[in-house]
Amino acid sequence: AKHQGLGSCIYSPEQDENRADRLSLVGELHQELQNPRNLCIHYQPLAALPSGNAAGMEALLRWQHPVHGPIPPDEIIRMAEHTGLIGPLTRWVLVTALCQFRQLLKQHPDLTLSVNLSAWNLQDPHLPEVVSDALRQCELPAFSLCLEITESAMMNDPVHARELLNVLSDMGVALSIDDYGTGFSSLSYLKLLPVDTLKIDRSFVMEMLEDENDAIIVRSTIDLAHNLGYKVVAEGVETGEVMTLLAALGCDYAQGYHLCRPVAFDEIQAWLERYSG
Ligand code: C2E
Ligand code: CA
Ligand code: CA
Ligand code: CA
């Protein structure tokens, strides 16, 4: 009951029919974490505006299942959350992504790596230790890492979240509020958190040229966020026109298919060669 309201769970009725499938998937995920064969990480760059130069990249989990094909990452995360695998999975993502990222640092010393956290990770008192172990193992300074936490995850258990985020922030890790605008949170509360960046949810960005209301929301979010001292990332930037408009509105960073889709590590390396100012 503690985690009620964190989205649908794997026991929803339509999925109940596939219960045996699901249970075997859980077992397979467990195995993948011991010995990853089909689990990997894709990367999507973040570009500074207006230059378009690479500023960082986000790690996005991928599971290419040999029978079921690609399993959507939110589904993997939900499954892991409900079966006690979220801790090990998050640790695997952190270590794997940081160690790959490490290989880029010599050529691209100013880039940061963003990794997504689940709401359930915020309930884990060992999280700061997991993060610092991963940084040490990959020989990276804390400021190379940005942790993305959804607005709703931060609001789920605010007092607890605040304590944990303070510890992470004191370590030197950057923190970003993901999917901003979808969580109905009060900025007066969010301001109490040691967060540097807001990521405007892609649902507002994708159609901001067609939908006047979306454009108004994005524009006022950028202004408000700047007045409160945040940097702003717009996600879901699918066209050059939207990117130009965001730059004109003073948005700090853009991320989306227009710049680059999430791609395997080799491809992100190639992309960076072209777009690092
Ligand atoms: P998110 O953190 O909001 O990640 C952005 C999602 O938007 C990604 O979906 C990305 O592929 C997609 N995207 C990027 N640019 C565009 C665009 O221009 N247009 C559109 N329509 N979509 C775009 P993806 O990779 O399917 O991931 C979905 C969600 O799964 C993520 O949303 C995140 O919440 C979760 N997720 C992925 N990897 C991890 C992970 O390692 N840990 C945790 N806890 N969650 C993860
Ligand atoms: Ca994210
Ligand atoms: Ca997001
Ligand atoms: Ca999202």
Image (cartoon, rainbow, N blue to C red):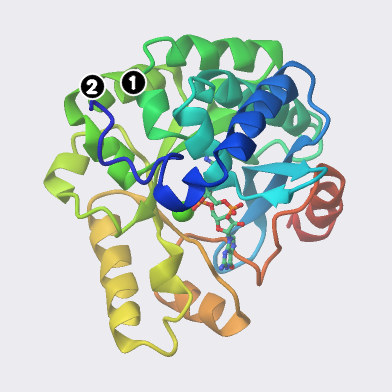
Q: Considering only vertical position in the picture, is 40 above or below 244?
A: above
- Left or right of 138 in this view: 5: left
What element does badge 1 sit on? helix
Q: Considering only vertical position in the picture, is 165 above or below 269?
A: above
Which label belongs to residue 227? Answer: none
Counting from the top left corner in percent of width and height, residue 145 is at 56, 31
- Left or right of 52 in this view: 248: left
**Is the C terminus in the top left, top right, bottom left or bottom right quadrant?**
bottom right
Q: Considering only vertical position in the picture, is 143 above or below 74?
A: above
- Looking at numbered disc 1 in the image, what kind of residue is underneath it? Gln
What element does badge 2 sit on? helix
**Is the N terminus in the top left, top right, bottom left or bottom right quadrant?**
top left
Which label belongs to residue 123? Answer: 1
| Nearest the eye: 69 or 6 | 69
User: Which quarter of the picture shows residue 266?
Assistant: top right
Which label belongs to residue 160? Answer: 2
Counting from the top left corner in percent of width and height, residue 131 is at 53, 17
Q: How crowded is mark 1: few (under 14 residues within 10 Å), some or many (20 or more)?
A: some
| CB under 8 Å between discs 1 and 2 | yes
Q: How crowded is mark 2: few (under 14 residues within 10 Å), some or many (20 or more)?
A: some
| Inter-mark Cα distance, 1 to 2 | 8 Å
Residue at 23%, 39% (x, y): give it: 155
- Looking at numbered disc 2 in the image, what kind of residue is underneath it? His
Of callouts 1 and 2, which one flags the residue occurring earlier in the amino acid sequence? 1
